[in-house]
Amino acid sequence: MTAPTIATPSQPPSRIRVGAWLTLASGLVGLLVSAWLVRLKFGADHLCDASGCPGGDDGPACAEALASGWSQLLGLPLGVWSIGHVVTTMFLAAAVLRRRGPLAEVAAPALLALGALGVAVSLALGLYAFTQFAHMCPFCVALYGTLTVAFIGALLVRGAAPTCPEGQARVGAARAVLIWALATGGTALAYQLAARSVTCPPPPPDPPPVTIAATVDAPRAAVMLFVDPTCPLCRRELHLLQQSLPRLRAHGAELWVYLFPRANCDERYLPSHEFVDGDGKPQTHGEARSNNACLGALAALCAERLAPGRGLDGLAALFDLQDTEAPRFTTDKVEKALAEVAEALGPGGKLRTCIDGEEASAALAAQQRYLLSWVKARGGRVGVPQAFVVPIVDGALHLDQAMPATSAGKILKLVEAPGAK
């Protein structure tokens, strides 16, 4: 009697093999990129460090993406959802190559559906980033590219016929959903557990005197915000906070704005060898230096000094100089911009004398030194905007209870939280 033979699946056509391998390769790259994006988002949200994506001399190119409300879904970073998506895609592509088992029954149509979803989400996020951000995050763009390649692979795989028995589609679909749930849920659980186990260092004691502020009677909290006049994200977040001043005041929160130009401004008060992070690396950024960020910061401080109560309006006018040609800040530009805020700040006034004076330079250096000391305790590079929501009890700042934030949305959430004092 002849022993029965076991049929082995024949090799799929070359088009299908190429598509499956293309999907697998793009999935591997997408998995690595997604994991790195999760790491960046974790650092920004839970380690107070949004400096993990350097974009050249002008600072972290991913800061806007990390701070955006579009960077998460249901409280989880989009990178977590992307990991589940990519892992499921890789399992389906492997099933196409194996050509057996319930998963192979649904692999081709599932890959096409997941690929179309990935491209649609990439287009939506990419269009939003292109129209709203000053910088495109390179890792986000890389992820959009891998999802597009995966969709191309899915198109090549389309029509792949499995060799498994019929009637296994439901089992295959259930397994695909289970793979997605395990990958996404496992990553989400690990992320949440890690988030609960880390904390940021509190701000140092004795903050510098407040120069630019929106105050309230009987304050219950202070929003300490550090900005750089050449930073587009700082401009946007401060604008949002100024629009939200009624909400801040309704919860007894004051807005204190400090200047942190990412450049060494005066060797007398802050030597260049001290303008470094905890590892001794200089914190000067080329764009801030070349666009005279120090001049813009000094002008903002002097605007409040010469026209009390107009500091925030003056800073907003200075931020608008970001729309001008480089260098963004010159004495003539600054005087012209501030003249529209208050007559005392225009040409012929005392603005130039104040900018050149020692008092403004010393005040600016104190504000820079304060944030630098926190960055050294935290680790990583300096990043702006940086904010702290600090409770005020009986007129005293409780810096040990300060909550860090890097976006207006998070600041408002912290101020309006039910447990906020």
Image (spheres, rainbow, N blue to C red):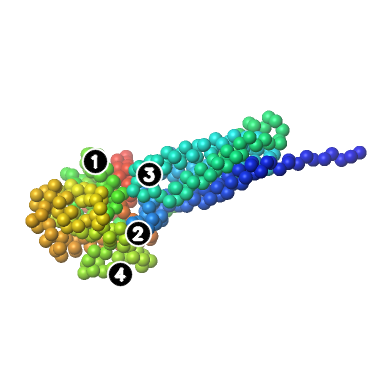
Residues at marks 2 and 1 touching, judged by CB atoms closer than 8 Å: no
In space, the residues marked 4 and 2 are separated at their CA atoms by 19 Å
In space, the residues marked 2 and 1 are separated at their CA atoms by 30 Å
Label whose residue precedes the other's in the sequence (3 or 4): 3
Q: Residues within 10 Å of mark 3 (few under 14, many from 20)?
A: few
In space, the residues marked 3 and 4 are separated at their CA atoms by 37 Å
Helix, strand or loop for disc 2 = loop
Pointer 1 residue: 243
Viewer-nearest residue: 58 or 277: 58
Pointer 3 residue: 130
The residue at 11%/53% (across/down) is: 345
Q: The residue under label 1 is which amino acid type?
A: Gln
In space, the residues marked 3 and 1 are separated at their CA atoms by 24 Å
Label whose residue precedes the other's in the sequence (3 or 1): 3
Q: Residues within 10 Å of mark 4 (few under 14, many from 20)?
A: few
Location of residue 363 (image quadrant):
bottom left
Measuring from the top left, give residue 122's x and y in whole percent: 46, 41
Pointer 4 residue: 273
Pointer 2 residue: 57
Helix, strand or loop for disc 4 = helix
